[in-house]
């Protein structure tokens, strides 16, 4: 039989969806599919659903690390018990992930195969990210004891944990390709996270410069709060630092908080240079997103304007102009509402196009009296060449005495 059963079609759909917008391996020509590859019993596939949940959980911990590491570096001069305990718990999860990584298969980019050999996995991990992961997991209390005296400042070692941010970048990269999430909002969320992180880090670093300066009165925050700004509540000092960072990033700069000493001036110079690049990055991305969302409407307006100019220049009768505008308007509606996606269908393999055409048109053709008694094989071949067309009211589809090149089946209209 030419037509597949419903269960077989659903099975093929599930099998083929393995490659759709995922990080799964696409087999090369002549290679067997990895869907049938069975890994060793104690080796985890990087595409396993449970492992992906674990990775997502670690990303949440990375977000906590991205906030607390600059905060401890800038505002805390000694360990804070609640934060210290939480940090060690988070480090414990990442230490567990280090052990787990030795049992996760990896993709050999030369042969495009999943490697499940424990020795090769250990060598691959040991020569890449293992050292950075281990260093970023060492408790800060232990790091202070083994570090040289100039590097024993609390929070300095914690900045190495920002190495974990690579997980967030990988998550956003995966979400941008996931059809279950809106690309526009994923990109906006990524830009917001980048901006908030930059503002947070700059505010923490700027406060640290003032807190470590020899003369508290000659600092940007001391000039505003006085020499005893250390005695202010931590929340007030943090909000003040974020206020300065945001006003500087947005180039508002009211002047109420400004650099006083040379180190602060130097930091401001580099921060404003950084802001130039960050602002260009944000504006460029937002412009691209907005323009992409309105490009179809702008193209439609340009087409209508071109048709009107053509009709006016050639003195066409109003009836022809109305037909041109009606046709272009209907085409815009069918494209924007997803009714006409011929370009998308043409990019698909013939087997998929035939299945779509069979689903859309077979019942219509089967009810046409001209095809009563025709075999299913012929109807299947016929519908595979069909496509939907839409015409506005009062438009001539076929002219009298014109040699037709297409066969039309009227579905709705008169």
Image (cartoon, rainbow, N blue to C red):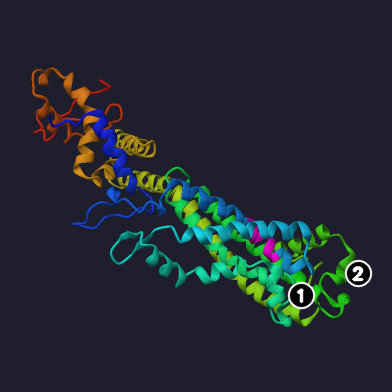
Q: Between 99 and 414, which is closer to the camera in this rendering?
A: 99
Determine crowd level at label 1: few under 14, some 14-19, many 20+ residues with C-alpha closer than 10 A. Answer: some
Residue at the extreme front of the image, as rendered:
41
Q: Which residues are magenta?
A: 64-70
x, y percentage for residue 169? 51, 59
Q: Is residue 141 above or below residue 49?
A: below
Find out whether residue 67 is within the magenta segment: yes
Q: Between 403 and 368, which is closer to the camera in this rendering?
A: 368
Q: Is residue 195 above or below residue 322?
A: below
Location of residue 267 by image quarter: bottom right
Residue that carries the numbered disc 1 in the rendered image: 209
Magenta segment, prevailing SS (helix, strand or loop): helix
Find out whether residue 376 is within the magenta segment: no
x, y percentage for residue 371? 11, 21
Residue occupying image coordinates x 71% and y 79% = 151
Lateral position of residue 134 relative to residue 104, left or right: right
x, y percentage for residue 390? 28, 32
Determine crowd level at label 2: few under 14, some 14-19, many 20+ residues with C-alpha closer than 10 A. Answer: few
Lateral position of residue 262 relative to residue 302, left or right: right
The quadrant of the image that shows the N terminus is top left
Residue 228 disc label: 2
Q: Between 316 and 234, which is closer to the camera in this rendering?
A: 234
Identify the element where label 1 is drawn: helix
Residue occupying image coordinates x 14% and y 33% = 406
Visible in this render: residue 12? Answer: yes
Lateral position of residue 95 relative to residue 306, left or right: right
Residue occupying image coordinates x 20% and y 26% = 362
Q: Between 214 and 72, which is closer to the camera in this rendering?
A: 72
The quadrant of the image that shows the C terminus is top left
Visible in this render: residue 396? Answer: no
């Amino acid at each position: 039989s030419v037509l597949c059963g419903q269960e077989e079609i659903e099975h093929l759909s599930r099998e083929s969806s393995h490659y759709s917008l995922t990080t799964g391996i696409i087999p090369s020509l002549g290679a067997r599919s990895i869907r049938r590859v069975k890994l060793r019993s104690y080796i985890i596939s990087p595409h396993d659903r449970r492992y992906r949940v674990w990775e997502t959980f670690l990303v949440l911990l990375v977000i906590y690390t991205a906030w607390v590491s600059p905060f401890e570096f800038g505002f805390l001069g000694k360990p804070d018990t609640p934060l210290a305990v939480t940090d060690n718990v988070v480090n414990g999860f990442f230490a567990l992930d280090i052990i787990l990584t030795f049992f996760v298969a990896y993709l050999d980019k030369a042969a495009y195969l999943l490697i499940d050999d424990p020795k090769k996995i250990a060598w691959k991990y040991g020569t890449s990210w293992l050292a950075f992961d281990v260093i970023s997991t060492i408790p800060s209390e232990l790091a202070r004891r083994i570090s040289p005296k100039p590097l024993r400042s609390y929070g300095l070692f914690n900045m190495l944990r920002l190495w974990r941010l690579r997980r967030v970048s990988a998550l956003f990269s995966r979400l941008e390709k996931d059809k279950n999430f809106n690309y526009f909002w994923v990109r906006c969320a990524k830009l917001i996270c980048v901006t908030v992180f930059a503002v947070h880090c700059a505010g923490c670093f700027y406060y640290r410069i003032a807190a470590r300066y020899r003369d508290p009165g000659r600092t940007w925050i001391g000039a505003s709060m006085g020499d005893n700004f250390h005695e202010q509540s931590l929340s007030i000092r943090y909000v003040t630092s974020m206020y300065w960072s945001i006003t500087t990033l947005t180039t508002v700069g009211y002047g109420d908080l400004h650099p006083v000493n040379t180190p602060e001036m130097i930091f401001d110079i580099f921060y404003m240079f950084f802001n130039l690049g960050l602002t260009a990055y944000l504006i460029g991305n937002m412009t691209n997103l907005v323009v992409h969302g309105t490009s179809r409407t702008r193209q439609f307006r340009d087409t209508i304007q071109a048709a009107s100019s053509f009709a006016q220049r050639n003195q066409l009768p109003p009836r022809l102009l109305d037909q041109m505008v009606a046709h272009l308007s209907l085409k815009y509606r069918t494209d924007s509402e997803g009714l006409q996606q011929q370009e998308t269908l043409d990019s698909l393999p013939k087997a998929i196009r035939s299945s779509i055409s069979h689903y859309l048109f077979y019942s219509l053709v089967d009810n046409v009296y001209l095809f009563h008694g025709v075999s299913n094989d012929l109807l299947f071949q016929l519908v595979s060449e069909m496509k939907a067309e839409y015409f506005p009211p009062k438009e001539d589809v076929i002219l009298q005495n014109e040699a037709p090149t297409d066969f039309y089946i009227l579905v709705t209209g008169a």
